[in-house]
Image: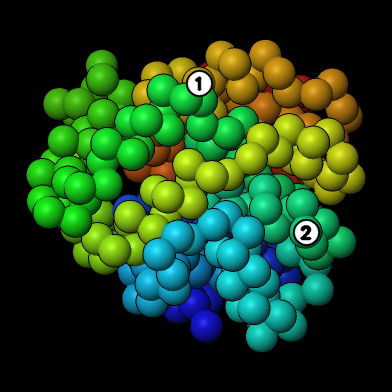
């Protein structure tokens, strides 16, 4: 079973799934700002943190199934699910296969679109360096995930992100890259899911095409979206704003499509 940690004493279960080359430690700063009504179930996805590498390819469906093993083990009947980046892809696969368990689905700097051909080719070109020089891969890639206009201010957070990334098993990272290439378009999940859907995106996100994402959100009353003045890592760049949105949206209601 995947490694997980539980914190908080609230009655609202919030399952948190980190992104690529991250682990459950990424939630520490934002968790302190989230409502006491939440109980946090933080999971290390396969090949990340203390969770094992499972296969040569970690598909989003396989990882969702492993998340389900944890939620079943903990007897979670209905819960909120939030996924950052790759964790959002896993969350969408979970929502597709197990929608009856969700109170809400939050795409946290993530997307329901698949990789385009350019992105797939970029990922394929990374295979060798991930295995042969993982440190160089991390050093080159991590800074690009932050707001380019605030890299001097965010220097400490960038170094923290690198440190966490370097704790990832290279074989696990490669398996997940291969799985992300294979993931399908899951727009239909957003269209069909009856649970509340929250989308938090970054104006300067270099990993997600935010304009395309927001433009194509289905016009449904159960979907709320926010675009923040940050890059791909709102949990580090804008933790106070992200926590305020999550607290309000998952526990209350706000108007639709706000921009910060």
| Relative depth, front residue between 188 and 27 | 188
Whether residues under marks 2 and 1 lie with C-beta atoms below 8 angstroms apart, the answer is no
Quick one: label 2 or label 1, which is nearer the N terminus? 2
Element under disc 1? loop
> Quadrant location of residue 99?
bottom right
Q: Callout 2 environment at 10 Å: few (<14), some (14 to 19), or many (20+)?
A: some
Residue 56 drawn at (x, y percent): 40, 64
Q: Residues within 10 Å of mark 1 (few under 14, many from 20)?
A: some
Residue at position x 48%, y 60% from top?
A: 58
Quarter-wise, where is residue 206 in the image?
top left
Placement of 6 over or under 105, stated as above or below: below
- Label 2, label 1: how many angstroms apart (C-alpha)? 25 Å
Position of residue 12 relative to residue 132, above or below, is: below
Q: Residue at x 34, y 63 (%)?
A: 172
Q: Which mark is residue 139?
A: none
Q: Is residue 174 above or below residue 125?
A: below
Which residue bears the numbered disc 2?
Answer: 97
Residue 227 placement (x, y as % from top left): 55, 22
Residue 70: x, y in percent? Answer: 61, 78
Whether residue 142 can be seen here = yes
Q: Which residue does the image show at 14% across and 41% down from the upper left? A: 139
Residue closer to the observer: 8 or 231: 231
- What x and y, as percent, mark residue 196? 80, 44
Secondary structure category for the residue under label 2: helix
Q: Which mark is residue 209?
A: 1
């Amino acid at each position: 079973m995947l490694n997980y940690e539980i914190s908080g004493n609230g009655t609202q279960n919030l399952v948190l799934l980190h992104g690529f080359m991250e682990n459950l430690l990424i939630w520490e700063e934002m968790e302190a700002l989230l409502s006491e009504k939440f109980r946090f179930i933080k999971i290390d996805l396969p090949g990340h943190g203390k969770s094992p590498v499972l296969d040569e390819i970690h598909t989003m469906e396989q990882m969702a199934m492993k998340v389900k093993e944890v939620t079943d083990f903990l007897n979670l009947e209905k819960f909120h699910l939030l996924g950052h980046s790759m964790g959002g892809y896993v969350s969408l696969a979970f929502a597709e296969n197990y929608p009856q368990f969700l109170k809400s689905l939050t795409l946290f700097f993530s997307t329901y679109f698949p990789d385009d051909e350019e992105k797939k080719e970029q990922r394929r070109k990374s295979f060798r360096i991930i295995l042969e020089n993982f440190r160089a891969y991390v050093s080159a890639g991590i800074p690009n995930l932050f707001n380019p206009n605030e890299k001097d201010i965010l220097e400490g957070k960038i170094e923290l992100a690198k440190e966490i990334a370097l704790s990832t098993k290279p074989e696990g990272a490669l398996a997940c890259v291969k799985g992300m290439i294979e993931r399908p378009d899951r727009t239909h999940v957003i269209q069909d899911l009856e649970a509340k859907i929250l989308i938090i995106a970054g104006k300067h996100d270099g990993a997600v095409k935010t304009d395309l994402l927001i433009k194509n959100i289905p016009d449904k009353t159960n979907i709320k979206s926010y675009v923040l003045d940050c890059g791909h890592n709102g949990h580090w760049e804008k933790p106070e704003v992200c926590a305020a949105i999550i607290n309000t949206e998952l526990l209350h209601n706000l108007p639709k499509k706000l921009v910060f």
